Amino acid sequence: MPPAVAPVEDAGGGGAGAVDEATYYSCHVAWLAWWNNVRCALVSTFALCPPAPATAKPATVRGTLFLPSTGDRRVRLFLQDHGGAADPQPADDVHFLVLDLPSGLGGADIAAAGRVVLEYQRQWAPAAAPGALLASPKWLVYCNGRRVGYAARREAPSDAEGWVLEKLRAVTAGAGRLPGGGVEYLRGRFERIVGSPDAESFHLLEPIGCPGVNNGGGGGLSIFFHRI
């Protein structure tokens, strides 16, 4: 309730007009003070919450897939932090995910599918508390809606893979074949979306001009990780 307004006595004998004028100003000040108190209470109660602190996980990462021309013919997937516009390459080249995709799954299969799903099952380690999703050691892989085998996570690229990645440092986005080596590659920036502790996805941002990817228009490749 607003405060009651006490009448103001005329100390100077200014007559009825002076009393009315003083009472008006007293009423105005009292209402203003009451409204300020109410406004403060409303602001403190209903003010919008401050924005949540930014997540430590980057919103954009650098993704590289390549298929060696000889030897172990499994597609490799590498994800690393993206340095941003001023520094598009991370300074230390640390990859937070290194995966060997199933043997027999070629780059053309991945490009044609446009959607790769990797699934980790809790029953594989029922006694262990779930850790970071991408730290899971193995995955079931589905490509174009078809189960194609298992993927295995490794801690870091091998020396031979490091050589290929070094050759690709100058490639910000694209797909093709390394001259001389015959290594097929696809490389670009991926948007990282964390849906929950048990679901993440990565979506290719740049058009890459690779035939078969999104009907030749580039982009369209998405990689989903789920823990069930």
Image (cartoon, rainbow, N blue to C red):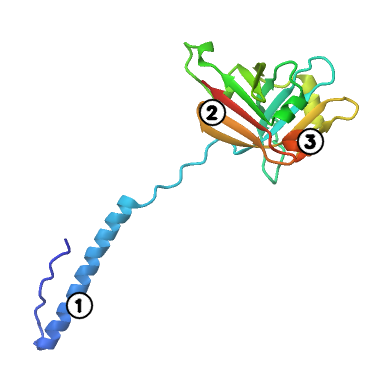
User: Which mark is first along the chain, 2 or 3?
Assistant: 2
**What's the residue at 12%, 67% (across, down)?**
4
Seen in the picture, residue 81 relative to 1 is either above or below; the reply is: above
Nearer the viewer's eye, disc 2 or disc 1? 2
**Mark 3 crowd level (few <14, some 14–19, many ≥20, 10 Å Cα):** some
**x then y, percent, for residue 142:** 64, 21
Provide the residue designation for mark 1.
25
Q: Are marks 3 and 2 in contact (CB under 8 Å)?
A: no
Q: Residues within 10 Å of mark 2 (few under 14, many from 20)?
A: some
Q: Upstream in the sequence, badge 1 or badge 3?
A: 1
Q: Is residue 190 left or right of residue 72?
A: left
Total number of numbered discs in the rendering:
3
| Residue at 55% from the left image edge and 24% from the top image edge | 226
Does the residue at mark 2 contact the one at mark 1 (Cβ under 8 Å)? no
- CA distance for labels 1 and 3: 78 Å
Q: Taking 192 as reference, is 153 above or below it?
A: above
Residue that mark 3 sits on? 210
Quadrant placement of the N terminus: bottom left
- Residue 154 seen by the camera: no
Tell me the amino acid under the disc marked 2. Ala
Element type where label 3 sits in the image: loop
Tell me the quarter of the picture where residue 97 sits: top right
> Which residue corresponds to mark 2?
199
Give the quarter of the image for residue 204: top right
Which of the 4 quarters of the picture holds residue 82?
Answer: top right
Q: Nearer the viewer, residue 27 or 118?
A: 118
The residue positioned farthest toward the right in the image shown: 180
- The type of residue carrying mark 3 is Cys
Task: Name the residue type under label 1.
Answer: Tyr
